[in-house]
Amino acid sequence: MVIDRYVAICKPLHYHTIMNHRMLIGFLVLSWAVGFIHTTSQMVFTVGLPFCGPNVVDSIFCDLPLVIKLACTDTYNLELLVIADSGLLSLVCFILLAISYIIMFITLGQRSSSASSKAVSTLSAHITVVTLFFGPAIFIYAFPFNSYSVDKFLSVFYSIITPFLNPIIYTLRNQEMKATIKRLSNQYIGSCLVS
């Protein structure tokens, strides 16, 4: 998404040349490969653990660190490996996103303000979604799960609210949708005034 936005904003005349079918398939394969390797590398160490006792994780956000704590052996090193692996992947993604947004804002600052207002609007929507995605993720991995209510709140926020933001933001930015919402609100206000 960031590379697509970068090319669309910083190199708009070359967009179709750079973001061709081959490039899109390469990005798709890369993202699936990184996800598969990340998950598999963590599961390889977890599958062989001996589990005993209660096997209930009282959390909506049932992530690997909570499952590892159910093992009957000392899992400190494995927990550290899992958190470091996930943290490193999240940190690298976040740094790459931050660098690309900084480059895009610098590029937009050098262009005319009328041409860049739509791009800034799009970037601000992306930054909002990225911040609301990475914020709870960093909080979940950085702090211990002592309070189940905080854990459940963050996991619902992370897994339900954040995925809805992109469709909501882009729906509300659509001109036809804005006109429909305005027309419906005027009808509602008119019907409230009549009654």
Image: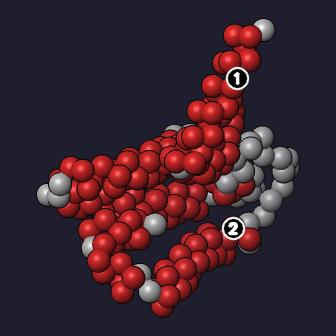
**Disc assigned to residue 188:** 1
Q: Quadrant of the C terminus?
A: top right
Q: Residue at x 31, y 72 (%)?
A: 12
Q: Which of marks 2 and 1 is in front?
A: 1
Q: Which amino acid does label 2 sit on?
A: Thr
**Residue 81 percent across, percent down from the top left:** 52, 63
Which of the two residues, 119 or 49, is positioned nearer the viewer here? 119
Front residue (pair 132, 51): 132
Mark 1 neighbour class, 10 Å CA radius: few under 14, some 14 to 19, many 20 or more: few
Against 10, is 24 above or below?
below
Residue 146 image point, x, y percent: 62, 33
The answer to which image quadrant residue 161 occupies is top right
Residue 120: where, in percent of width, then height? 32, 50
Q: Position of residue 159 (x, y in %)?
A: 66, 48
Q: Any mark on residue 46, and which? A: 2
Q: How far apart are marks 2 and 1 (CA)?
A: 56 Å
| Vertical relation: 171 (above or below) 96 | above
Classify mark 2: helix, strand or loop: helix
Q: What residue type is labelled 1?
A: Tyr
Residue for point 53% across, 50% down: 174
147 vs 173: above or below: above
Q: In this view, does 153 lie to the left or right of 107?
A: right
